Image (cartoon, helix red, strand yellow):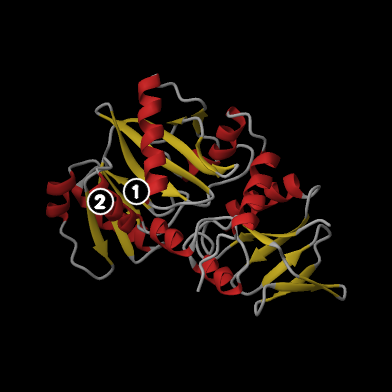
């Protein structure tokens, strides 16, 4: 008998549309093997959306759905929600309480890695190279001179808890710092400011595949914009080259570093970590625990380069999740 799989997508953040795209791709690649259902997680409703557009409300008491008189219980949830509440630990905690397996990392890892500042603080004692940083919280006094003295110019000012490059600005002048902070505050009450790292930008997918940690081929990112922002990521203004045009030594260095980060953070499921080779050394930028999953997204490109089809990639994580039941035991 086919297993019932709920693919949750959407969410409450500005990454909503990107998440819908990822979720639909997963649906297309698993529908033959599973009873797959697209579940839209929206601010005002959680609904199963059928191919004909019909909607059926999720019963949040047990995450079941009644469709035409039949109550459907899900064997596993495939989490493709980017941003809140699917990437920050909220959905992970909810499914943990219901003891329903879900494909992304556990609730603590999700909450930690969604918070860029906390992730950097946890990794720093392990000797992970990273940019210099300054933290700011809404309502605090902005010390432009102190920021420039610590970080130099240009520097990056970004929302602490946001994805897809929303709320991020590359700042060239001291006078632009306050406006950049205001942009970041539209996404989050916490702000992360970092020194500019000049060098080759790469992204490394690390996943659990066939029961083992697997590092995927490295992707080089060449942006037509000033940095790898939303337009570069989603409007075709960048080249994503897999495998990256870096030396074998560089590829081994950044792959080892990405795996170490995955292990230190006790990750499971899919992840994608971003780095910049600054002064010849890989520096960690951030980790994404629910990366984009469309055919043109970076992680699927890397899987393809490793001769792993999307159907194999998605099926494996579902079966591994059900097998190990990666929920937090209350």
Residue most toward the right? 68
| Count of marks overlaid on the render | 2
Residue, x 43% and y 57% (percent of image)? Answer: 162
Which residue is the site of mark 1? 169
Q: Quadrant of residue 255?
A: top left
Q: Which of marks 1 and 2 is nearer the N terminus?
A: 1
Can you tell which of label 1 and label 2 is closer to the viewer? 1
Label 2 near label 1: C-beta < 8 Å?
A: yes
User: On screen, 40 above or below 201?
Assistant: below
Tell me if I can see residue 227 in this picture: no
Estimate the x, y position of residue 299 in percent, counting from the top left: 55, 39
Estimate the x, y position of residue 210 in percent, counting from the top left: 60, 42
Judge from the rendering whether residue 253 lies leftward or rightward of residue 13; answer left or right.
Answer: left
Q: Say which of 47 and 328 sits in front.
A: 328
Residue, x 63% and y 43% (percent of image)? Answer: 294
Q: Say which of 63 and 326 sits in front.
A: 326
Judge from the rendering whether residue 136 lies leftward or rightward of residue 318; answer left or right.
Answer: left
Q: Which numbered disc covers residue 88?
A: none
């Amino acid at each position: 008998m086919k297993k019932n799989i709920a693919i949750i997508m959407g969410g409450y953040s500005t990454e909503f549309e990107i998440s819908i795209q990822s979720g639909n791709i997963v649906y297309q690649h698993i529908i033959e093997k599973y009873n797959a259902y697209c579940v839209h997680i929206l601010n005002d409703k959680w609904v199963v959306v059928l191919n004909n557009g019909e909607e059926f409300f999720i019963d949040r008491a047990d995450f079941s759905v009644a469709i035409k008189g039949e109550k459907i219980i899900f064997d596993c949830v495939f989490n493709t929600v980017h941003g809140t509440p699917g990437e920050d630990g909220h959905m992970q905690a909810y499914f943990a309480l219901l003891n329903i397996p879900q494909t992304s990392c556990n609730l603590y890892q999700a909450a930690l890695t969604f918070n860029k500042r906390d992730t950097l603080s946890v990794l720093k004692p392990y000797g992970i190279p990273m940019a210099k940083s300054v933290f700011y919280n809404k309502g605090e006094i902005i010390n432009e001179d102190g920021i420039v003295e610590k970080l130099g110019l240009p520097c990056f000012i970004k929302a602490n808890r946001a994805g897809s490059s929303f709320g991020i600005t590359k700042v060239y002048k001291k006078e632009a710092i306050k406006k950049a902070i205001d942009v970041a505050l539209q996404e989050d009450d916490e702000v992360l400011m970092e020194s500019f790292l000049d060098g080759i930008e790469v992204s490394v997918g690390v996943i659990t595949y066939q029961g083992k940690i697997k590092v995927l081929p490295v992707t080089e990112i060449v942006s037509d914009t000033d940095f790898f922002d939303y337009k570069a990521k989603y409007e075709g203004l960048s080249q994503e080259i897999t495998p990256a045009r870096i030396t074998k030594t560089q590829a081994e260095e950044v792959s080892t570093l990405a795996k170490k980060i995955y292990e230190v953070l006790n990750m499971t499921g899919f992840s994608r970590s971003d780095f910049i080779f600054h002064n010849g050394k890989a520096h960690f930028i951030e980790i994404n625990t629910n990366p984009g999953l469309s055919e043109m997204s970076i992680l699927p490109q890397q899987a393809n380069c490793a001769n792993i089809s999307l159907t194999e990639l998605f099926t494996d994580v579902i079966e591994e999740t059900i097998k190990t039941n990666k929920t937090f035991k209350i």
